[in-house]
Each structure stands twice: as structure tokens, then as C-alpha cells.
Amino acid sequence: MNRDFSKLVDRSFDVLVCGGGIYGAWTAYDAALRGFKVAIVDQGDWASATSSASSKLIHGGLRYLESLDFKLVKKSLRERQMLMKAAPHRVWPLRFGVPVFTDSRFGSIRLIVGLTLYDLLAGIAGTGEAHRHFSRSEFAHHFPCLVHSKLRSGFTYLDAQTDDARFVLELIDGASEAGAICVNYCEATDFIDHQGQVCGARLHDKVSGKAERVHARQIVYATGQWLAGEQLAQVKLTKGIHLILPNVLGSEALLLTAQQDGRVFFIIPWYGLTLLGTTDTPYTGDVDRLTIGKDDIDYLLNEANRALKVHWTEADIIGRYAGLRVLKQSQALTPSAMSRDWELKIADNGLLVSAGGKFTSAREDAAHIVDTICHNLKRDKPCQTFARPFPWLPDADFQQWQESAGLEAAKLGIDDVCAHWLIRRHASRVAKLFALVDNNPELAKRIFPELPFIYADLILCARTEMVIHLEDVLRRRMPLLVLTKMTRAEIAHLAGIVAQELDWSRNRMEEEIENCSRKWLEIAVS
């Protein structure tokens, strides 16, 4: 992946996508595969906002059945099933446990009905993937971390997990390979109109400081939270926070109901630790200055501590992050009751505006955007992304390839846990990483003893994944900044390695250390 702003200069495109989150990435990838001349830009890094601040799930949304949003659940479940086959390295099965306590809002019968419907909508009813019921003792054995005093029984059901930032990155790489020009840290400052119709944009390159005009027959505005406050689409924002805590789970997750307000939250295994989330509160503040308040933290810790044998305090928090959901205007009384569905707005000047939606169902929504572009530009080309193998999926039986890659990793001195995550993170590109280790065995060492990331991973990301700033590689290419309490000295150590790969000057490196430390060390103590 190479960033080259000059490729935008003096060019006309069929499609210009503004916004490099999950919706923009799928749109650019689909449009490029359909043969359009495509450019995609983002004012920050790829997936640097909501698309890297999710619960890391590919799921139907079991709780949406309560609001009878069957259409959205079925759509999301269809995508979930497809993605597990098209991208087994990027989307993998994750079973959730749902305990039934004596004071649970949902009893066993209601859960049986809901989970059966969930399986039917996913097309897995009657298979080994369908939900399962457990007695009190069986469920307690399955989830020993739970408080068992009020436990009556429990269920498990299927959903799936991902690394959201790498999901987006792989799509950007796929779009690039299909011919799209992809430039991060490039802001569309305003649009160019001709006879009342948008026909281009003025772009500002935040790296070089240059500004250029780019012409495009269609412009897609998929900027997520930056829609708030604009007249392009009437949306509402809600804030969701997640906390990273010590591991308490095995390979399965928990879905729990908060006693405080009755809403659902998750306890999920992620990179060997625990991901706890999420909150869902209205947000009207500055979208560029999102903070995590004590009320947010107390809400999650109190609810988790009610259900778990542990007693987590703020001192146990390893990392934290927050994101903003973009929701359609609604008369719903609470944020959780607002629809998560998506809509395409077409402005009077022809601008296509993507509003709302879910990470899981973004591909289908993006396909609708590109269908609209095909109609407008009179090009009859069907969607190319459904069931298409992901760009980094090896051209071989995945299970056999995975086993072979694991054996190769072991020969190179890479431990089994690191190899497992490296294969998921890089898939077919892991061969480049193995070559680095083969040339320098020291690169097989873990960066932090408790986390499954090695130095070769850091170097490969810095070298090949369009990294501009230190935060790009330490937060999104590798989520180190939220998985460990890094010190300034540790940030500086890793910055030295990245600086060597990116040929940063000493002053540039110090600037990156300062910016990264100021932001993330403040988050850690806020």
C-alpha cells in the first residue's frame, strides 16, 4: 500500500469517496471492482474514528429482535455468514453465553424463542452452530467467572468477531489493487459545483500542505460522525466506550443485561484480554474531542462486577477507547431504541450521503451506493463484493494453509499464540513477515511479554501499510496503545523502530513521540 497524493493531481474520476471508514472502504472497493475510476480520501487515517472504536463484532444484533427490527437482523446475519466464509482470517466465529439469573429481564422461554428466531434468520437452525441450552451446573462450569448464586441456567449462541481497523485496511488495500487511488490524511475542504451539481472537490494534503482540485462525476460523502451539525443529513450521535481489562474468559464471550437501565453489554475475549462494552449515551459535543468520563467507566465496571466474581476497579483498566455512532433521526425515547439501519441521502446537488448503519451490514449498504452510481452514470455492472474472497485470503484451502503457516512460524521461533494472531492479522501477507524473521531471528520476539505481537509485525506494518503517524501503527495497525499501559519510554522505543523504517528525522520522531504520548498517556489517566 503506497500513499501518493500526486496521483490525484490533474485527474478526473468517476467516483470520489470522502471518508475512509467501513462505509467508504466498501464503497471504494466495490466501485473499483465494477470498473469505475475511483479515488478515496480521509482527513485522518483509515478507520481512525468510529470504525476502529467498535465492539469488534460481526453480528446480527440479537437485541434488535426486541424492537422487532427483523429486516436489519436478517440482513446483518446474512452478511455475518457470508463474511465468515469469504474472510475466515478476518472474521471468525465467537460464541456468546447468555446467563439466566433469578432476576433476569429475560427468562428462559423468551430466550428460547429469540435465539431460535436468530438461528432461523441466519440459516443455521438445526445445525451444530445453533444455540444451545445449559443447566445451571453446566453453565457455571462453562463460565466459571460468573457469580453463580442467582444463576438458574444459560444459553450459548453464535456470532463472530473481527479486528475492525484491519478489516477496513484490507478493503482499502483491495480497492488500491483494483485501481483506486487511496490517500489518507487528505481532506476534502469544499466541493466544486457546476450548474448546481457537484462535480469535484478541493483537496488538502495534510502531509505536504498542497491543495488540488479533483473532478469526479459522482461524490460519495461517507464521513460518519462529521455529518453531525451539517444539513446534508439529519443524524444523531451516541457515544459508546469500551474498557480493556485482565482476562477472565476462555474462548467464548458473554452477553449481559445491565440492571441500571436494562440495556445489553458485552464481555469479550480480545487478543488475550477482556473487552468490556459498551455504553450508549446521547452526544452533542465536539466530535474531534471525544472523552471518556467517570460516569461511563463506573457504569461498565458496576454492571460487570454485579455479574462476575472479580471486583474490577478503575486501577484494573489496561486501556480504553470511545467512538460515536451515527443514527438516523428518531422519535425513540432512548439511544438504544434508535434504529441502527442505514439510508442513502441524495442532496439537491447530486452529492450521495451515507448516513447511519452498522459495521456488519456496511457491505450491502455500500453496494446500494454503487448501484445508484451505476444508474446515474448509465453503467450496467452488478455488485462484485458479495461472497468474494477477501484481498488477503490465501488462494488455497484456508484450514490447510493455516496449519502450514503455523508450522513455518514454529520453525522460525515464533510462539504458537503469536503465530495464531499473525495469521489472522496478515493472512497471505504473513509470508513477508516470515521473511523478515528468517533474515533476523530477533524479530520473532514479543514487543510486550503479555501481548501476542512481535517486532516483525511492527516493521511490516510501518513499511507496507500506509503509516503516516506513530499513532497509526501503535493504535490501528497494531492496537498496542489500548492493550497495554505504555510508558513514554516504551512509546519512544517503538518510535525509534518506526522512524528508521519511515526515514523520519530526529525532530520528526520527537514530534511523533510527543503527540502520541500527550494523547494516549492522558487517556490512560483521565
Image (cartoon, rainbow, N blue to C red):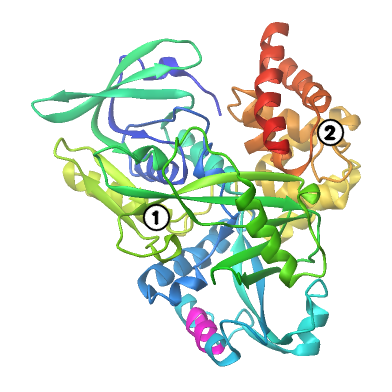
Relative to the observer, which residue lies in front, 47 or 13?
Answer: 47
Residue drawn at (74%, 28%) of the image: 459
Residue 332's place in the image compared with 101, above or below, is: above
| Residue assigned mark 1 | 357
Q: Main secondary structure of the magenta part?
A: helix
Residue 158, horizontal then vertical, whole percent: 61, 73
Relative to the observer, which residue lies in front, 422 or 322?
Answer: 322
What amino acid type should be assigned to the residue bearing mark 2? Val
Q: Nearer the viewer, mark 2 or mark 1?
A: 1
Assign the N terminus to one quadrant of the image: top right
Q: Is residue 209 magenta?
A: no
Q: Left or right of 476: which side holds 372?
A: left
Residue 490's place in the image compared with 147, above or below, is: above
Residue 391 makes an appearance in the image: no
Assign the C terminus to one quadrant of the image: top right
Residue drawn at (55%, 42%) of the image: 170
Separation of residues labelled 2 and 1 (CA atoms): 41 Å
Residue 281, horizontal then vertical, whole percent: 49, 54
Q: Is residue 114 magenta?
A: yes
Residue 266, horizontal then vertical, whole percent: 63, 64
Label 1 crowd (10 A; few <14 / some 14-19 / many >=20): many
Residue 470, horizontal then vertical, whole percent: 66, 24
Residue 281 got which mark? Answer: none
- Which residue range is magenta in the image? 112-119
| Residue assigned mark 2 | 437
What amino acid type should be assigned to the residue bearing mark 1? Gly
